């Protein structure tokens, strides 16, 4: 595991470099993507590089990590809507190659079909993760087993509260999400985790220096051969020497 600690802006630039390097080497790469506040600036960089003619998404396939159960793709708080607004609508990606779990039709029985789709696309080359203040990755909350495929997960109360900032009221935050499982995440060939802000410091420290344990789902990444963590100075406060 490589850990890069720098300003937020430099972390974003360096993470973006991973994407450029991959897309230059493999124009038909399969990307795993996250939503939330953390990746927004990175998506902005990717759009700028596309507009400048440096990269193309024409042959790229994407799989997002998760989606709220009960929200249609055109709901303003859905993760499909987020991705359209923050990235897909601004680049030359083929809409048919963009995948976000279906928040309306996924059932416990068919959720793992998403893993089959990822496999059929050749597997994820580069997966982007954020981290919850409680150490979650995707919506694999503390206590999630390490062997899960894509599934329907209950959101922790703390996660619902953290994400209430995007909704009109906290009660509107869905109680469940369809999420790639930890096994799904660990199958990606290369992983980037970005963590920004003081409220992530405890989770980053626990993930990087604590025991590998389902109590801190992000700690599982220490078992993966190719993970880079980009933490800004605030998020890295608990691991800086
Ligand atoms: C989002 C996701 C979540 C977020 C995490 C951090 O697709 O899977 O794990 O990455 O909750 O969210 P932000 O970036 O909003 O702090």
Image (spheres, helix red, strand yellow):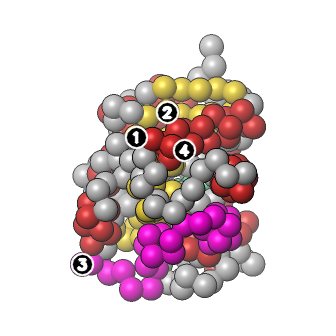
Residue at disc 4, secondary structure: helix
For label 2, the crowd category at 10 Å Cα-Cα, with few meaning under 14, some 14 to 19 and many 20 or more, is: some
**Quarter of the rendering occupied by the C terminus:** top right
For label 3, the crowd category at 10 Å Cα-Cα, with few meaning under 14, some 14 to 19 and many 20 or more, is: few
Q: What residue did someone put label 2 on? A: 228
- Residue at x-position 60% and y-position 84%: 74
Which callout, 1 or 3, points at the residue further toward the start of the chain? Answer: 3
Which residues fall within the magenta stretch? 83-110
Which callout, 4 or 1, points at the residue further toward the start of the chain? Answer: 4
The circle drawn on residue 19 is: 4
Marks 4 and 2, how far apart at CA: 13 Å
The circle drawn on residue 109 is: 3
- Residue at x-position 51% and y-position 63%: 58
Marks 3 and 2, how far apart at CA: 33 Å
Could one spot residue 65 in this view of the protein? no
To which quarter of the image does residue 8 belong?
top right
Q: Decide: marks 1, 3 in contact (CB < 8 A)?
A: no
Which callout, 2 or 1, points at the residue further toward the start of the chain? Answer: 1
The circle drawn on residue 239 is: none
Placement of 23 over or under 58, stated as above or below: above
Residue at disc 3, secondary structure: loop
Which callout, 3 or 4, points at the residue further toward the start of the chain? Answer: 4
């Amino acid at each position: 595991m490589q850990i890069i600690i720098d300003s937020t802006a430099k972390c974003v630039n360096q993470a973006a470099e991973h994407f450029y390097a991959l897309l230059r080497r493999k124009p038909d790469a399969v990307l795993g993507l996250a939503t939330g506040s953390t990746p927004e600036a990175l998506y902005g960089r990717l759009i700028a590089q596309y507009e400048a003619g440096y990269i193309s998404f024409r042959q790229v396939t994407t799989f997002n990590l998760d989606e709220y159960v009960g929200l249609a793709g055109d709901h303003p708080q859905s993760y499909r809507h987020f991705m359209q607004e923050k990235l897909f609508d601004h680049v030359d990606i083929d809409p048919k190659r963009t995948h976000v779990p279906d928040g309306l039709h996924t059932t416990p029985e068919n959720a793992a079909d998403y893993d089959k789709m990822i496999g059929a696309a050749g597997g994820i080359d580069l997966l982007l993760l954020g981290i919850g203040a409680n150490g979650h990755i995707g919506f694999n909350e503390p206590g999630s087993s390490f062997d899960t495929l894509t599934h329907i997960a209950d959101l922790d109360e703390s996660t619902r509260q953290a994400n209430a900032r995007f909704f009109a009221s906290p009660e509107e935050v869905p109680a469940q999400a369809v999420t790639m499982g930890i096994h799904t995440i660990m199958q990606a060939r290369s992983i980037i985790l970005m963590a920004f802000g003081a409220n992530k410091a405890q989770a980053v420290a626990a993930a990087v220096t604590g025991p590998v344990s389902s109590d801190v789902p992000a700690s599982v990444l220490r078992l993966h051969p190719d993970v880079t963590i980009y933490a800004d100075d605030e998020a890295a406060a608990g691991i800086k020497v």
